[in-house]
Amino acid sequence: MNAFDAPLWSPFPANLENSGIQRFITHFSRVSGRSYPDFASLHRASIENREAFWSSIWDFCGVIGEKGDRVLIDDRMPGAIFFPDAKLNFAENLLRPSACADAIVFRSENQVERRMSRIELLDLVSRAQHWLMAEGVKAGDRVAAILPNMPESVAMMLATASIGAIWSSCSPDFGPRGVLDRFGQITPKILITSDGYFYNGKTLRLD
């Protein structure tokens, strides 16, 4: 090993043993019946046995959904297609229970701070989902939004995804032409916007 191959930093053994990658190595070793003593050997396995590797990733990460019978078709890189029969919901996976108490920690430019628990976020997403469905939004529809970065924006995105609709958003400072150029291409069923936002210490109204 020359100086250029030496790692710049290595974790303490105890931290490495408790890391997510080490837990996956243990899991993959068990299901594959082979030993992977280090990351390099795991990396080689991910190249040489892509189907088993990514199927194991799905199981280890606890992805909520239907994996399907086929994991990999057209086994070439580039060009491989993974999980061609899989079905899952993005929002369902993001909103599943977690040990973390806070789902969102928000601080705005004017120093307003808000914390939203996972239960509060789930409740907000549920209410937004019901409103979208009452407005006729269904899977495949487009929902567009002109919103600043705030918890409600995240909730609306998740509510849209939970239905199977497509979310597109832009910042309130885009201007009319920028908004039309972006959203005119996707013909959204619903357009959501805020009545104002903070920027550079100023309150700007969207009248």
Image (spheres, helix red, strand yellow):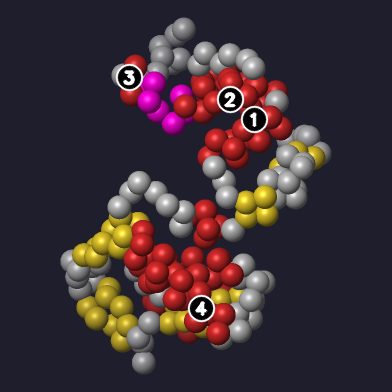
Q: In which quarter of the image is residue 32?
A: top right
Give the spatial CA distance, label 3 vs label 2.
20 Å
Magenta stretch contains residue 18: yes
Reading the image, the residue beneath label 1 is 53
Which tag, 4 or 2, sits closer to the chain's start? 2
Q: In which quarter of the image is residue 196?
A: bottom left
Residue wearing tag 2: 28
150 left or right of 54? Answer: left
Q: How far apart are marks 4 and 2 (CA)?
A: 41 Å
Q: Main secondary structure of the magenta part?
A: helix
Separation of disc 2 and disc 1 at Cα? 8 Å
Circle 1: residue type = Phe
**In-front residue for pair 4/119:** 119
Residue at image position (41%, 75%) is: 147
Q: How many labels does the image show?
A: 4
Circles 2 and 1: CB distance less than 8 Å?
yes
Kind of residue at badge 3: Ala
Start-end of magenta stretch = 16-22
Measured along the vertical axis of the image, is residue 60 above or below residue 197? above
Instruction: Tell me if residue 174 can be seen.
Output: no
Neighbour class for label 4 at 10 Å: few (<14), some, many (≥20)? some
Check disc 4 and give the amino acid type: His
Nearer to us of marks 4 and 3 is 4
- Does 72 sit above or below residue 187? above
Tell me the kind of residue under disc 2.
Phe
Residue assigned mark 3: 14
- In the displayed orientation, state which residue is furthest to the top: 1
Q: Which residue lies furthest to the bottom in this view?
A: 207
* Neighbour tally class for label 1: few under 14, some 14-19, many 20 plus, Cα within 10 Å: some
First in sequence: mark 2 or mark 1? 2
